[in-house]
Image: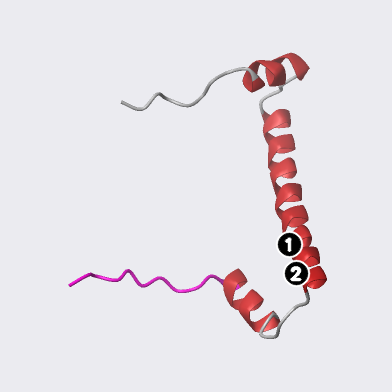
């Protein structure tokens, strides 16, 4: 017997389900996806800007980070 993990939906998931209980056209769905992508990209940029300021980074530090491999090799 498999144990199911029950997790409630988040407030965002519930709001989306309520808001979109009807079919969207193909174009509307594309626009909705773009809107979500824009929302999350703005949040990400804001967090990156915050890290930039809090850590007193400059362009050289950003270039260093971009060229650093941060992933560990799997065994």
Residue 2 is one of the magenta-drawn residues: yes
Is 70 in front, or is 10? Answer: 70
Q: What residue is shown at x 81% (from left), y 65% (from top)? A: 31
Q: Position of residue 35 (x, y in %)?
A: 78, 61
Give the crowd class for mark 2: few <14, some 14-19, many >=20 residues within 10 Å: few
Q: Secondary structure at mark 1?
A: helix
The tag on residue 29 is 2
- State which quadrant residue 72 falls in: top left
* Quadrant holding the N terminus: bottom left
- State which quadrant residue 21 falls in: bottom right
Q: Position of residue 59 (x, y in %)?
A: 77, 18
What residue is shown with label 1?
Answer: 33
Q: CA distance from mark 1 to mark 2?
A: 6 Å
Q: Secondary structure at mark 2?
A: helix
Q: What residue is shown at x 73% (from left), y 48% (from top)? A: 41
* Quadrant holding the C terminus: top left
Tell me whether the residue at label 1 lies in contact with that at label 2, contact meaning CB atoms closer than 8 angstroms. Answer: yes
The part of the chain drawn in magenta is 1-11
- Report the residue that reaches farthest toward the front: 26
Above or below, 69 relative to 7: above
Give the crowd class for mark 1: few <14, some 14-19, many >=20 residues within 10 Å: few
- Report the residue that reaches farthest toward the bottom: 22
Q: What residue is shown at x 68% (from left), y 41% (from top)? A: 47
Question: Magenta stretch mostly in which secondary structure?
Answer: loop
Q: Position of residue 13 (x, y in %)?
A: 58, 72
């Amino acid at each position: 017997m498999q144990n199911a993990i029950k997790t409630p939906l988040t407030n965002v998931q519930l709001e989306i389900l309520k808001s979109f209980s009807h079919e969207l056209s193909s174009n509307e769905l594309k626009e909705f996806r773009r809107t979500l992508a824009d929302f999350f990209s703005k949040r990400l940029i804001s967090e990156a800007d915050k890290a930039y300021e809090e850590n007193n980074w400059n362009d050289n530090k950003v270039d260093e980070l971009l060229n650093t491999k941060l992933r560990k090799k799997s065994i």
